[in-house]
Image (tube, helix red, strand yellow):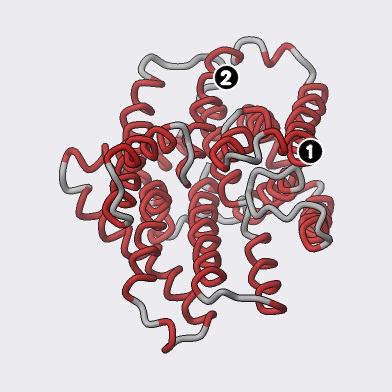
Amino acid sequence: MNEVYWLRIIACLSVVLTHAVSRVITDFSLSGDIRVVYRTLQMLLLYGTPMFVLISTIVMTHAYKEKIPTGFLRKRIKYILVPYLVMATFYAGHKYIRFDWTFKNFAIELGFNFIGQWHGYFVLIIFQFYLLHLLFIKYLKRFKAMHVLIVSFIISAGYWISFYFFFIDFVQHSSYLTLFFSRILIFGWLFYYVVAYYCGRNYEMFIDKLHRYWMVVVLGTIVSMGLVQFIYHSGMLMRVTSARFDIIPYTVMLFFLFFLLFSKLNRIPTWIVSISGYSYGIYLLHPFVQTMVRSWFPLLEITPFGYMIVQFMAGVIVPIIFIYLLSKFHLGAFIVGKTMTRKKVFRETAMSKAA
């Protein structure tokens, strides 16, 4: 699936830009119409994290339709979960130094980071899907796809609607509890897994239907995008997070639209492959880089838009340099994940086409 390389880089860059916008809003203390403009842009970019969930699942379900190979979980623990734990420790340590914390504060922060209370939380979501796939790969195909899709959508959308409109008061006293129940548990993300499961399992049919119903995909993307903006700007739900019920249709329709567009391309540019291979490491490292930029950069000498560009470029380029240097060492893969070389990607792509 060559489209995955494109989607991975789009999701990665969207997440970096989302956090760059957050830095602009916070560091410049924006208010009024200019704040609305940047929040609108941020809401458009919130598909980034759930797009990673869709990408991981479609790759998994396309590759392993009937049986999970030996070592499936072990490999992902080594190169996805271990870097997650390492970077969770790193971010807790950074706060320990930055805020002159006690060791007790560090230990508490580390514990919260391990259970997903930092930007790398999507890894825990994906691992829940890995376990779900191991358990249900033999049974899910027995049910009608439409029934599973409807039930999973009701569960996902219903979970977040119930949480934000009925139950959030019960955990409002703790931001950690709010974050845990809103974005870590699998229920709100279940629909993404089911959609990607059927798309990956029936890849050729999926692409054919995208081309056949392209107008529905385009209109669905526009309508769902408008819905997200309406719900936010009307004040119905003001939380700026990917864990929202209205982000579900928006992300899925964008996923379809990107797949539709990139399925028309026969060639993968080398720079797309390179950055795609660095995407996990960029995801893990970019907030630290952006925090450092804030510490060193003179805000009085730049506009908010220029600052956003600086934060975005730094959040992409500096992590790539770090990842490249770390990849020269064996332990680097356990810090920022395993990067795939261009030669290996093209060799595997050629083999799949030949098959």
- To which quarter of the image does residue 331 belong? top left
Is residue 149 visible in the rendered structure shown here?
Answer: yes
- According to the picture, the residue beneath numbered tag 1 turns out to be 161
Query: In this rendering, is residue 315 above or below 12?
Result: below
187 or 31: nearer the eye? 31
- To which quarter of the image does residue 313 belong? bottom left
Q: Position of residue 284 (x, y in %)?
A: 39, 48
Local crowd size for mark 1, using a 10 Å CA cut-off: few (<14), some (14–19), many (≥20): some
Judged left or right of residue 311, residue 256 is right
Q: Position of residue 124 (x, y in %)?
A: 49, 32
Query: In this rendering, is residue 280 above or below 191?
Result: below
Say which amino acid is labelled 2. Answer: Leu
Please report the residue visible at 54 percent of the width from the left and 64 percent of the height from the top.
Answer: 22
29 or 203: nearer the eye? 29
Q: Nearer the viewer, mark 1 or mark 2?
A: 1
Judged left or right of residue 130, residue 146 is right
Question: Tag 2, which secondary structure?
Answer: helix
- According to the picture, the residue beneath numbered tag 2 turns out to be 132
